Image: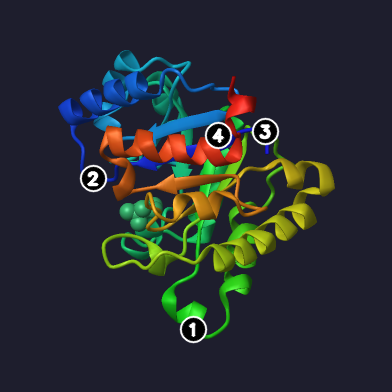
Amino acid sequence: MEKVYLGTNTKMYKGLADTVSYVEELCRLTADLPREKLELFVIPSFIALDAARKSADQKLLRLGGQNMGWAEEGPYTGEISPRMLLECGATIAELGHSERRHVLGETDEMVNRKVLCAVEHGLTALLCIGETAEEKEKGLADEVLQMQLKRGLYQLPPPTGEQLWVAYEPVWAIGEQGVPATKEYAEERHRTIRRTLVQLFGEERGAQIPLLYGGSVNPENAVGLIQMEHIDGLFIGRSAWDAPRFSQLIRSVLDVCFPKETML
Ligand code: PEP
């Protein structure tokens, strides 16, 4: 593993002032960590993006949008375009989060249009996929993941690891009621995802795409998860929203991925 991907989506929680103080503190607390080994990102509310960009050192922290419309501009009330995201300092577009799919009705076809548009505009598309509890119980998890990938990435030319990241976030693992996946279960699903990406994009490009696990990651399970062969990063909600706590988690992950002698 050359570098580890660690980031958070603050959902509809932190407003403008909270986001600014959060990213400032996170940058300060992690400034000493080598960015060639750590891709750190925060995905705040749209309204806080521009201020976050002004308060956070872009060399330390990347920013993203929690959603994106599928066109450069147009009659899409309430949507935000790739150009607008870029203008506010976002370089990542988080697409297809389970709350957008299961609470707000987003389909694979909508997600696909967004992925194509994000990549076309030079953003990193962070595609979120994951099965529901019912699908898991029926033994359909791998089929669901394959379907979400094939539909969500339809007609995307083989991407580089900068154009596409995939987050595996089982719906049953996310949020306060969520139960984190075991590291073994997550690893199995990540293997399926990697295999599908290689089928879609070929050995070289398919192997380059970073795979992140998300769903009730916490300081206790983060280290075990990141040590799995096919898990390249962690996408974290609640456990990352306090900057000192997140910084501790980041340090413990880096410590196991890159033991001290390689960090010097
Ligand atoms: C999420 O919503 O993507 C998420 C992973 O949240 P949490 O870590 O709080 O389960």
Disc 2 to disc 1, C-alpha distance: 30 Å
Q: Which residue is mark 4?
A: 124
Earlier-in-chain disc, 4 versus 2: 2
Question: Mark 2 or mark 1: which comes first in sequence?
Answer: 2
Foreground pick, 71 / 57:
57
- Name the amino acid type tagged 3: Glu
User: How far is disc 4 from disc 1 in space, using C-alphas?
Assistant: 33 Å
* Label 2 to label 3: alpha-carbon separation: 32 Å
Quickly name the residue at label 1. Answer: 137
**Residue assigned mark 2:** 12
Could you tell me how far apart the alpha carbons at marks 3 and 1 are, in whole angstroms? 35 Å
Which tag is nearer the camera, tag 4 or tag 3?
A: 3
Q: Residues within 10 Å of mark 3 (few under 14, many from 20)?
A: few
Q: Quadrant of the C terminus?
A: top right
Look at label 1 and name its amino acid. Glu
In contact (CB < 8 Å): disc 4 and disc 1: no
Q: Secondary structure at mark 4?
A: strand
Of the image marks 3 and 1, the number of the one nearer the N terminus = 3
